[in-house]
Image (cartoon, rainbow, N blue to C red):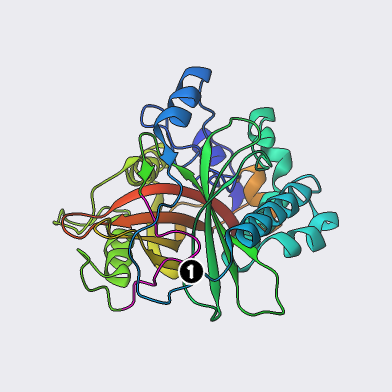
Amino acid sequence: MTLHHRSRAANLAALAVTGIALSVAVSACSSSTPSTASATSKATARATATAKPSESTKPANGAVGAETPEQANAEVAKAITAQIAAAAVPGTKGKALREAAYVDQALAAATAQGKLVSTLTAAQKADLALSPTDPVVLAVSRSAAYPRVILAKATFAGSGSPALVTLVTPGADTAYRIASIARMLPSATVGKFDAVTVGSAPIGDASGLAVAPDALLAAYSAALAYPAPAAAEGPFTEDAFFAAVRKGAADQAASLGSAVTLKQTHAPAGVVAALRAATGQGAYVVAVIERKDSLTEKTANALTPSKAFTILSGKSVINKSAVLSTYEFVVFHIPASGKATVVAAAEQLYAASGT
């Protein structure tokens, strides 16, 4: 096939954002382009997307947190310091720093982010790092057993927007590392957890909750697909992130035209943390969803992909098809009854391939 440049081709690899901390705004959010909120919307987000520190309830007798409040604060500070250091050194030179700061899908996302720094705006670059100022420990897992989890609230250095940061460690010989960073959605709040001294209980069999985490994650993932599935009553309330991803896919398909087909799938990629909140306040689940955007050229023309696609795939021309892989980091609140809601979310394009 011969190369034939057209305007829709420029959008080929812009289906996923190029920053781990996607800014989700109801009025100006697209899953294809990271948005930078205005000063007014940032201030509103800081005022309304709040996360409240723990308050004592009445957990089981003898319950103990995985870390003391002092230890938990120290671990969060250490992890944020590592994240800031990694953000300052993109590309291959920052490999060791990223491995010290992140784990699992968050590491894959941060690695891709380091490769794609040249595609970001100045405002987006300023928001790559978290702020070291006044992070708040919201919850720690209960008991001295491993693996252990710490959930904290922090802010992004550039915009000051609030984020939920999840730290995990598999054992005593491994430091806590970041498994998820998700930007809080507009007007979202996080309720109370049991005090850090007694820790937050795991969800377990999901008794007393409106829906089990695995069932919620499966339903939410399936509903995000493009072409959109038939409307069905789900166990969750549609949120700003959900609307942005769905709209982004529809807009992308329209811009590509009839010569290219777009199929987008979302599959559960795991639960990072699942902790019960204080009595009567349900639970919070930190999860990862993997999105696959598959594009197929139906004509004899080639496509010219975006710079981000070329950086990740090594290809400057797409003759037949392309696949873009994105991790979506989502934090759900599951109530005792009613529908679950997303309180924080982020996404990161981490791989691309084409033929």
Residue 83, x across and y down, in percent: 71, 52
Looking at the picture, does residue 34 appear above or below residue 331? above
Q: Secondary structure at mark 1?
A: loop
Please state the horizontal and vertical placement of residue 45, each as a whole percent of the image. Answer: 44, 30
Q: Residue furthest top?
A: 40
| Amino acid type of the residue tagged 1 in the rendering | Ser
- Residue 200 belongs to the span the image colors magenta: yes
Q: Residue at x 56, y 38 (%)?
A: 10
Q: Quadrant of the C terminus?
A: bottom right
Left or right: residue 37 versus residue 210 is right
Front in this rendered view, residue 301 or 163? 163
Q: Residue extending furthest front?
A: 61
Instruction: Confirm whether residue 296 shows in the render.
Output: no
- Confirm whether the magenta stretch covers residue 39: no
Depth check: 153 or 230 in front? Answer: 153
Whether residue 333 is situated above or below residue 200 in the rendered picture: above
Give the x, y percent position of residue 267.
39, 67
Instruction: Inspect this view and state whether residue 131 appears.
Output: yes
Instruction: Depth check: give the residue in front, 345 or 30.
Output: 345
- State left or right for residue 322 relative to residue 96: left
What's the residue at 61%, 38% (across, down)? 156
Q: Which residues are magenta?
A: 192-204
From the image, give the main secondary structure of the stretch colored magenta.
loop
- Taking the spot 34% from the left edge, 42% from the top edge, the residue there is 250
| Numbered circles on residues, count | 1
Residue with the mark numbered 1: 141
